[in-house]
Amino acid sequence: MFNLFPIDNGVCAPEGFYCNGVSAGLKANSQLDLAFIYADSLCDVEAIFTQNKFCAAPIMHYKEYQEGFKTNFILINSKNANALTGNEGINNIKEVLSTLQQMFPNVTNPIMSSTGTIGVQLPKEKIISAFPLFKLDTKNNQNAANAIMTTDRFNKTIAFEVFLDDGKSFRIGAICKGAGMINPSLATMLCFITTDAAIPKEDMRPLLLKASKTTFNAISVDGDTSTNDTILLLTNHKSGVYHKEAFLFALEKLMHKLATDIVRDGEGATKLVAFEIKGAKTQQEAEKCAKALSQSLLVKTALFGCDPNWGRIASTIGASGIECSPETLEIYFDDICVYSKGKILFDDINEEKATRILKQDSFKILCDIGLGKESFIAYGCDLGYDYVKINADYRT
C-alpha cells in the first residue's frame, strides 16, 4: 500500500523547508544556540503543549494567534526557557519577532520556542543581534538540531520519504531536543515536524494526538513535566500527495524514534528500558501501571546497578492502583521469567541471565497482569550519579 524510506536533512528534507543554527552568545564558547525553521510558503500548523499549568511565555504567545492561523517561521533559542517571566516575557517575544519581521518582511506569523533555565528574562538583545546571520535559503539540519540542545548528549533528527503504490510520494522530517525533565504527560521536549504532505487541516490535530499517545506521552526520564513542552507540526502541502494511513504510520514511526532517543539520552542514563504491561483489565490500567514502573526511583536505581530486583517491580505494580493479583502476575526480563503466578523462579541461573540482560544498553521488562487483554508500553531509563551532577549544576 505504501513504503517508507529513511532520508537525510531532517526538518528541511520536505520540499520548501529551510533551517539553520547560529551562535547568539547565549551559550559559552560560541556554541550554536539559536535556530530557525523557514518555509517558502505559508503552512498550516498544529501544536501540542505542556500540561504544566505554568506554561512558558512562548506557549502563551502562540495561543494569542487566531485559531487556524498560518505561519512560515519558527525561531528556537536554547539556554533560556522564558518561563515564569510574566507579561514582560511575552512582550519580549513580541519585540524579538517584530524585529525579525522588519529584517525579513516575508516572515508571517512567526512562532517562538524556548528551552533552558526557568525564571530568567529572555536575552532579547543577544537574540536580535544574531538575526543578520540568518540566511533563509540555508538547509543545515545538523546546525539547527545542535542549536536547540541543552543537556542533550547528541542531537535528534530524522526524516522519511513515503511512496504510495502509484509512485507518488511525500516527505516528513523533524528535529527534537530533550534529556531531562521528562515525564509521560507530553515529555519535556521540543519537537518540530515538517511535511510537504497535503494533509487536510482537520486531520492534523487528531493524528498528532494519536501518535503522541504511544510515543512522547509514553516516556519518562525523571518524572518532571516542563513548562515548555512543545510539538509543532507544519505542512506546506507542496507534494500534493496525501494518504491518511501512510501519513499516520510515518508520523508514529518518526515520533517513536525521537521519543526513545530522548530516553536513551536521559540525563545520566545508561540504558533504554521498555516497560510492557499486558493482561490488564483495561487499557487505562495498563498505561497507568507501565508509567508507574517507568517513573519508580527504586526500579530505576536497581536498573542502574544492573540488579534484577523483581520484587521492586512487583511492589510498584501493587502500589499503582490497578486491579492485580500475585496469583496471576508474571514478570520477565526480556524472555527470562523470574516470577510466575505465585511461584518464584529467581534461582541462581535465572539471576545470572537477568543480570546479563540488564547490562545491555536496551531491553524489555514484561509484566503480564493475567486479568484481561489490554496492554501498553512505556519507555524509561535508569537513574545514576550523573543525573544528580547535571541537575545540581544546571544553572551554571
Image (cartoon, grey):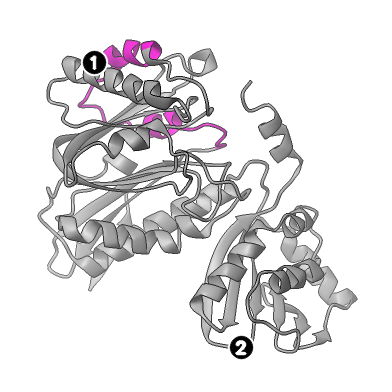
- The residue under label 1 is 99
Where does the magenta region start and end? Answer: 125-153
Q: Is residue 213 left or right of residue 313?
A: left
Q: Which residue is at the far right? A: 348
> Residue 231's spot in the image, x, y percent?
37, 47
**What type is the residue that disc 1 sits on?**
Thr
- Alpha carbon distance from label 1 to label 2: 60 Å
Q: Is 140 one of the magenta-colored residues?
A: yes
- Give the structural element (helix, strand or loop) at label 1: helix
Q: Which residue is at the far front? A: 87
- Please tell me whether residue 61 is drawn above or below residue 248 in the rendered image: above
- Please tell me whether residue 292 is drawn above or below residue 114 in the rendered image: below
Rendered-image quadrant of the N terminus: bottom left
Tag 1: Cα neighbours inside 10 Å, few (<14), some, or many (≥20)? Answer: some
- The residue under label 2 is 371
Q: Looking at the image, can residue 314 be seen?
A: yes
> Residue 232's spot in the image, x, y percent?
32, 45
Residue at x 73% of width, y 54% of height: 297
Q: Is residue 354 left or right of residue 9?
A: right
Q: Is 120 one of the magenta-colored residues?
A: no
